[in-house]
Image: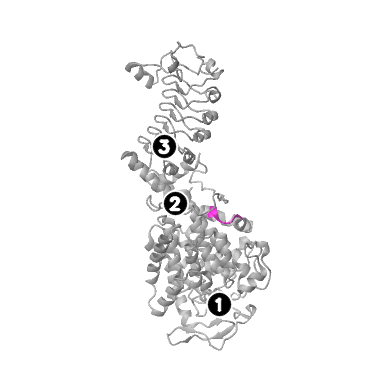
Amino acid sequence: MGNVEVHDLSPVREDERKELNLSRQLNYKQYCRHVEGFPSESCLREIPWNIRDSLSLFERMNVAFNSLTELPKEIPLRLPHLSYLDLSHNQLETLPESFGLLFHLETVRLNYNKLITLPNSFYHLIKLSKLDLSHNCLKSIPNECIHLECLEKLNVSHNKLKALPTALGGLKSLKVLIANNNRLQEPFLLASEHGSDELLSQLRKSYNLRNQCSELLPSTSHNVFPRIRGNHLHTSVPNPHSAQVQYIQSQTHTANTSCRIKTPLLPPPDASSLDAYDLRDRILGLIYGAAIGDAVGIATCCMCYDECKFHYNTDIIHYADIIQDEVRVRWKQGDWTSNFDTMVLLLDSIINWAGVIDELEYAKRLHTWCRNGYPELGDKNGIILSETVKQVIENSEFLKHPHLASAEILEKSTVHVYGVESSPSKDDDGDCSVDSSCSELSTISDMGRGPLFPSSHPSIPSIKFGTDNGAITSIAILGVPYFHVLNEVETNTVRICKTTHSRPLCIASCVMVTHLVAQMLQGRTDLNCSKTVDEMIEQAATMATKHLHDENDISVFNSYINKTVISSIDLGEQFNMSFTLKALSAGLIALKSQQTFKSFMMSLFMEGGDSNSVGCVTGALLGCKVGYSHLPQEWIQGLRQKQTTWLNTKINHFLDMIGLP
């Protein structure tokens, strides 16, 4: 027991007994032959049994320049005090899972072996400070390396790595990183060639960007999207890192042409600072955030603040809690409304036209949906909530010239607000208004005039005809295609908004939403920093304001985008619930807030008003900020399964077009 020699080597002095040396001394010629794969016959093929069967207190072990093909799992039990281990220049392909029990290891040399992967337990070596894995066959390093908190020096050169884990950037102790002669893609390829400092700088920048929007979120994510990839992409990959690498490859000349044809929305390599999984998480967060904002928001639609408090718990509204009355009875438990339906119309248009945004195609889809809804979901018609949309689709020119039809109704169509029919009149500023004698809002069942689509839901009012939120509720998805080209995002947004809503205030509010989405997908804004969020909003506001030419419109627009608390928006304003700037203002306050998704959305819902429309817009923006993985699990799972299965098929196709794993 103790430091008693248990091998057949010659006795050594007492001061040398801390090291068990089983390595071979080679001359240059022998070294060359060994490296070339012609080891001497005298090389050890396995660890001697007399070592494997007894306990020793050696602190160092050197078995370099042998021909070991495996390491016995008993080693941690027989040599529990090892702090230095040299297994270099052997034939090891794997390490035993028990390797992680060598708790005291500080230096490990595994260079010049045939390692393809490392056991999960390897990353439990929290005292490890120096690790040499060069000249192996490693294809990936998992993010679990973040647990090697004492690691100061790492050599992974001459492997088959296609990417480096961003977690390496989170190792504050890491001072030297060598990763040349791998298969790295940009930006790490160039950085690795420039040396350790440059490479570590790049990794730390990536790590910080990855974690900017997660610091104030729950420590664990709850939601895993059922990703099913198209048959033109690999349906499975060994681990997330190889999937990330595949995504990076597809952005470069290394991808074959046929795949690129099927990924028309594939962004260029420098489009986003987010990795593929974070980018996907934000896109999914936008879509599902809008869906649940709409579906849960219907609970308090058209209610005042006191009614909201009377019917619901202020902490959480479950779908089963939603009361049934004349407003809510049209939707089944866990269903979303036309707000999200029309966003899906845009998503369908993007998918079916390979990323091309066309107002005629969208107008046709909208007209068909208004008549039939989604028959595959059991709809018989679309329930239209916007008075503006109702009148636009009835215009005879809508399917041929939607922009013209949208503009004409502002002057020629009858205005139907508050259950009163009146021709558009001009106020002192030349804006359309309604008869001021309308002092009371008629019951919701009395609204409307029996339109071409008679099953449509009565409209929710906006005090100025043509400024309701019928466009802004669906528009956020247009921030995703070409998110890296802001001018393209703006052009597409204007084109679709003007299909139904020609008012400059509607156009400006829609442009601001998609601009914010695009900036968040670019990943260059610290979403937990108030200053940088304000700068992002200011940039979006600058682009949006270009579409406003009336001083009064500009003043109203600025007043809404500068509001700081939900209560100041007056969401329950009796005759102006659906004003487009109310939804925009709520979304901006959400982005500035440090509340969780559930907490903020509940405070929004409890204000009542046009809560499902405002919730759809706000849910899209806030969902994009926090990501799908951090949306409230009960709100996602509570959505109708038939709808989510149908939606997920579309989303998977959309992600294929972007090339995301």
Q: Amino acid at mark 2?
A: Thr
Residue 254 % position (x, y) = 38, 43
Q: Is residue 589 visible?
A: yes
Q: Which residue is mark 3?
A: 161
Secondary structure predominantly adopted by residues drawn in magenta: helix
Q: Find residue 385 and name its label.
A: none
Of the numbered discs 3 and 1, the one sitting upstream in the chain is 3
- In percent of width and height, residue 212 lies at 45, 53
Q: Is residue 424 magenta?
A: no
Circles 1 and 2 in contact, beta carbons < 8 Å:
no
Mark 3 and mark 1: span between their CA atoms? 59 Å
Q: Is residue 579 above or below residue 62?
A: below
Badge 3 crowding class, 10 Å Cα cut-off, few under 14, some 14 to 19, many 20 or more, is many
Q: Nearer the viewer, residue 71 or 378?
A: 71
Q: Nearer the viewer, residue 428 or 630?
A: 630
Q: Earlier in the sequence, mark 2 or mark 3?
A: 3
Q: Which residues are magenta?
A: 628-633
Q: Is residue 629 magenta?
A: yes
* Disc number for residue 263: 2
In this picture the colour scheme is: one colour
504 on left or right of 437: left
Tell me which amino acid carries mark 3: Leu
Q: Looking at the picture, how far across and down is residue 23, in whole percent? A: 42, 18
Q: Nearer the viewer, mark 1 or mark 2?
A: 1
* 403 displayed left or right of 445: left
Tally of numbered tags: 3
Q: Secondary structure at mark 1?
A: loop
Residue 422 against residue 91 in the figure, above or below:
below
Residue at point 61%, 60% (across, down): 376
- Residue identified by numbered label 1: 573
What is the x, y in percent for residue 384?
57, 72
